[in-house]
Image (cartoon, rainbow, N blue to C red):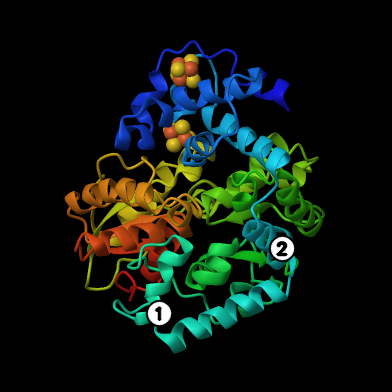
Amino acid sequence: MLDKLEQITISCMKCGNCKSVCPTFRELGDEGISPRGRVRLIRGIASGEVELSARYKELVGTCLNCRACADECPSGIEPNAAVLQARQHMVLEKGLPAVKRAIFRGAMRGRRLFPASSKLLGLLQRASMIGKPGNPLRKAFPWVGLPQDKNIPYFALKSVLDRFPEVMPVENRKFRVAYFVGCGANLISPEIGNAVVGLLNHYGVEVVIPHKQMCCGTPIFNSGDFEGAAYFARRNISAFGRLDVDAIITACGSCGLSLKHEWKDLLGLDVPDNIANKVVDISEFLVDWLGITELGAPGDKPYSVTYHDPCHLARGMGVRTQPRKLLTSAAGGGYTEMKEADWCCGGAGAYSVYYPDMSRRIGNTKAENAAASGADVVATGCPVCIIQLREMLERAGSAQKVSHTACLLWDAVHGKPAGG
Ligand code: SF4
Ligand code: SF4
């Protein structure tokens, strides 16, 4: 493992190019929290000059895995990937914290129990009205390291997997695809699943949703538990690997990137071409496969829209133009590009739970840019970005709506206004 850490960091020539695009470095201006600083620290671990201290853990932990630094590096270093390997090294040396172990190795593995627990949590959230500001139960948030005013999204009472049968045939079928739903849409924002399935069926695409699918593993390997993440990847490979489909559709950049690259490149798994080569984001599928660029107008209520690029969708899967093209048509009131649209929003999986201060600093900058665009609606292609953008815009006092691209497109097909 130490050899590997050395090998993936050795060609750093300390030029510092990567620092100019790193959101954490921009917030604090501290070398240790820059990609170059992190690479140097990881090399120090490999050579034995640096210890696995709490400071090291924090500097490696606060990386968002936004991948911006990798695009800037003339030596081909991927500081984000080095960080993930360094986290794995920490887990191998020190083990997983007890709470993460209980969640990753216990709760999340229950294919029926996990969604049932999430539904129960959703019921409790609604019954206790914990979402209301000033609710006394919020006084307990700081006990688990969360700010008292943290927005916690409500878990859905009916998941996407519970809403749809495994196969949804259509007449005059153009394609047959599988849909990898992902935890964010399945358990928190099932309206994304409704929109994805609705759009695909509407345009003549048969949809298969294997009910044995599980989490893609991103939150698990992001915490350094590669072995735990591989458990989920293998089960998904067995659920999707033998399907006779033209494509596997995702509506979350992180899920898509896992299936397409990370199960193989990061976890070292043997991923069949039938999966890795078939992963397509929903907006990419609509434009590049179905040739759709025009959607119905949003009734008599056109709105203006801007778009936030999820890191893993833009830099990981290379999807940038298709959502913009579709949204311009769907909104009817004009598209405005926001400043720094592809800078991370600070959501980054569970980052806002582990590092709420840094997450808010980065999120505030994103909210300022979104608000300055003047658009009525902020669209994006990742359920976690939606949660983060909603919280940050609400905190900034902005009235902008935030929605998944697929939801806005589905509304447009019905001639509805955004979120109508
Ligand atoms: S992945 Fe993002 S947060 Fe992490 S070091 Fe690179 S630019 Fe900074
Ligand atoms: S851009 Fe690459 S070579 Fe330059 S400091 Fe960053 S990681 Fe090292």
Residue 43: image location, x then y, percent: 59, 20
Residue 80: image location, x then y, percent: 53, 33
Question: Between 100 and 194, which is closer to the camera in this rendering?
Answer: 100
Looking at the image, which residue is at 54% across and 18% down?
76
Image side of residue 84 versus residue 395, left or right: right
**Three-letter code for the amino acid on which mark 1 is drawn:** Leu
Residue 25 shows in this picture: yes
Q: How far apart are the alpha carbons under marks 2 and 1? A: 34 Å
Q: Secondary structure at mark 1?
A: helix
Looking at the image, which residue is at 52% across and 27% down?
79
Q: Secondary structure at mark 2?
A: loop
What residue occupies the far bottom of the structure in this picture?
127
Relative to 234, is 187 above or below? below
Image side of residue 122 versus residue 261, left or right: left
Question: Between 13 and 262, which is closer to the camera in this rendering?
Answer: 13
Pick the quarter of the image with the N terminus: top right
Ligand 1 sits in which quadrant? top left
Which is nearer the N-term, disc 2 or disc 1?
1
Q: Which residue is identified by label 2?
A: 213
Query: Which image quadrant for residue 267?
Result: top right
Looking at the image, which residue is at 40% across and 79% down?
137
The image's mark for residue 137 is 1
Pick the quarter of the image with the C terminus: bottom left
Q: Are marks 2 and 1 in contact (CB under 8 Å)?
A: no
**Three-letter code for the amino acid on which mark 2 is drawn:** Gln
